[in-house]
Amino acid sequence: MATRSLVPTFIMKTFEMLEDQSISHIVSWTEEGLSFVVKSQKLLQQQVLPQYFKHRNYSSFLRQLNLYNFKKSKHQDGQEFKHKCFRKGVKQMLQFIKRRNNDDGNQESVNPNQPSAKLKEEQNILRVCASDIKDTNTRLDEDMQILKQKSGVLLEEMWNLKKLLHSQFDQVNHKLERIDIIIGAMSQHKKFKNISQYFTTKFLQNELHTLETNLNQPLFESPKQEVDDQEQIKALFEELQNLSKPIQFD
């Protein structure tokens, strides 16, 4: 609030006007954010100036810009206005935009050995810019730490899921090996043949349902090795689907 009180009302309203994206087709910042362009004088007079400045006089708006040392130039989209302390997103520098004073030159000549007002202004601008850069770097460091923490959590969850799927894979293989042994033994006796086939089908359907439930869990992006592991598990899943189809008895 202290900074805002130092900013001339006209400058603050002009800055707020340019922050309004809904009128960017009438007036807006340039792509670099170092100046702004009036694209339609007519619409600015009719729609924008009454809202922010309580008048419809474009000439008056231009006079105010001139009094605050804005430089006007031609632009492919209209009229461009620029001031070294008037930049997109840098509200801290607005306090250094001063109304033109005809006595400034006389005051400087009285004290030739003292730093000029212009030099002091440049120094203040540099201090504000340095402070703004420091704050930006601090925010970037904080964001980087948050991203590192999130990536660590995702990596841990990915490995836990990988271990779970590998465990399911090993369990199914182990049970299939046991079934092979049992079927081999039971097939020696004809009366157990159809019974063993029936229970084998039921078991495979059971395992298929369990594996399908696990595979429906969300998988995180992972390196190529994890992708290969998923492909192996999907292949097993398809094999179980085939094995779980009803067996045709002789």
Image (cartoon, rainbow, N blue to C red):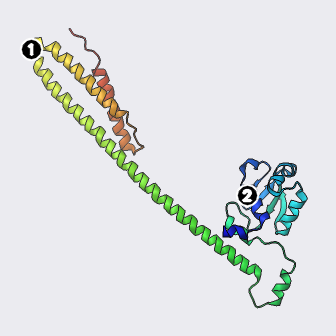
Quadrant in the rendering for residue 199:
top left
Q: Is residue 247 visible?
A: yes
Residue drawn at (13%, 23%), measured in percent from left and top? 182
Q: CA distance from mark 1 to mark 2?
A: 91 Å
Question: Residue 130 at x, y = what percent?
Answer: 62, 72
Q: Secondary structure at mark 1?
A: loop
* x and y percentages locating residue 89 in the rendered image: 67, 60
Q: Earlier in the sequence, mark 1 or mark 2?
A: 2
Q: Residue at x 24, y 19 (%)?
A: 201
Q: Describe the element under mark 2 as helix, strand or loop.
A: helix
Left or right side of 117 for 250: left
Judging depth in this view, the residue of 227 and 65 nearest the camera is 65
List the residue tagged with mark 2: 16
When asked about the image quadrant of residue 34, the answer is: bottom right
Where residue 54 appears, as percent x and y from the top left, is: 84, 56
Which of the 4 image quarters holds residue 198? top left
Residue at left offset 70%, top offset 60%: 88
User: Residue 245 at what x, y percent from top left?
Assistant: 29, 17
- Work out whether 214 lies above or below 17: above
Is 40 situated left or right of 2 in this image? right
Cβ atoms at labels 1 and 2 below 8 Å apart: no
Using the image, tell me which numbered label, if any, was put on residue 189: 1
Callout 2 crowding tier (Cα within 10 Å): few <14, some 14–19, many ≥20: few
Amino acid type of disc 1? His
Of residues 69 and 19, which is closer to you in this image? Answer: 19
